[in-house]
Structure formats: C-alpha cells, structure tokens
Amino acid sequence: MPIEWINGFLGGLLISIAGVVLLLGNGRILDASRIPGSQVES
C-alpha cells in the first residue's frame, strides 16, 4: 500500500487548515482595527 498519497492528502489538509486559520485571523484583526477607527470618526 503506497503511503505517498497519504502524505499528499495530509499536506493538502494542513495547507487548507492553515489557509482557513489565516483568513479567520485576518478577518478578526481587521474587525478589531475597524472598531476603534469608527469610534474615533464618530
């Protein structure tokens, strides 16, 4: 049984998870930085 496809699958899975975490983290950082800015403007 070849293990190469398992390594490829795990690698793709890790990359996908990292991408989702980055997107969620960036979204939260943007939301957090947007809140003080809107309070300063108003």
Image (cartoon, rainbow, N blue to C red):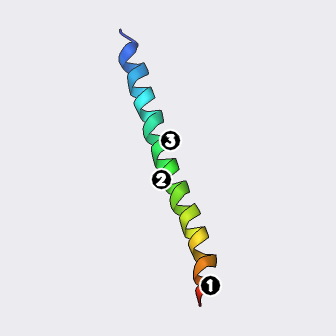
Front position among marks 3 and 1 = 1
Quadrant showing the N terminus? top left
In this view, the residue in front, 26 or 4, is: 26
Disc 3 to disc 2: CB gap under 8 Å? no
Q: Amino acid at mark 3?
A: Ala
Residue where numbered disc 3 is placed: 18
Circle nearer the N terminus (3, 1): 3
Depicted 15 relative to depicted 33: above or below: above
Label located before the other in sequence (3 or 2): 3
Choose the circle earlier in sequence order: 2 or 1: 2
- Considering the numbered disc 3 on the image, is that residue within a helix, a strand or a loop? helix
Which residue sits at x=36%, y=10%?
2
Count of residue discs: 3
Mark-to-mark CA distance, 3 and 2 = 9 Å
What residue is pinned by disc 1?
A: 39
Q: Quadrant of the C terminus?
A: bottom right
Q: Is residue 7 above or below residue 24?
A: above
What residue is shown at x 43% (from left), y 34% (from top)?
Answer: 13
Secondary structure at badge 2 equals: helix
Where disc 1 sits, the SS reads: helix
Task: Say few, some or many: other residues with alpha carbon within 10 Å of mark 3 (under 14 / 14 to 19 / 20 or more).
Answer: few
Q: CA distance from mark 3 to mark 1?
A: 32 Å
Does residue 2 lie above or below 28 as drawn?
Answer: above
**Along the viewing direction, whichever of 39 and 13 lies nearer the viewer:** 39
User: Which image quarter: residue 35?
Assistant: bottom right
Q: Is residue 39 left or right of residue 12?
A: right
Note whether 6 is above or below 12 in the view shown.
above
Badge 2 local density, few (<14 within 10 Å), some, or many (20+)? few
Q: Position of residue 5 (x, y in %)?
A: 35, 18
Residue 17 in the image: x percent, y percent?
47, 42
Q: Which residue corresponds to mark 2?
A: 23
- Check disc 1 and give the amino acid type: Gln
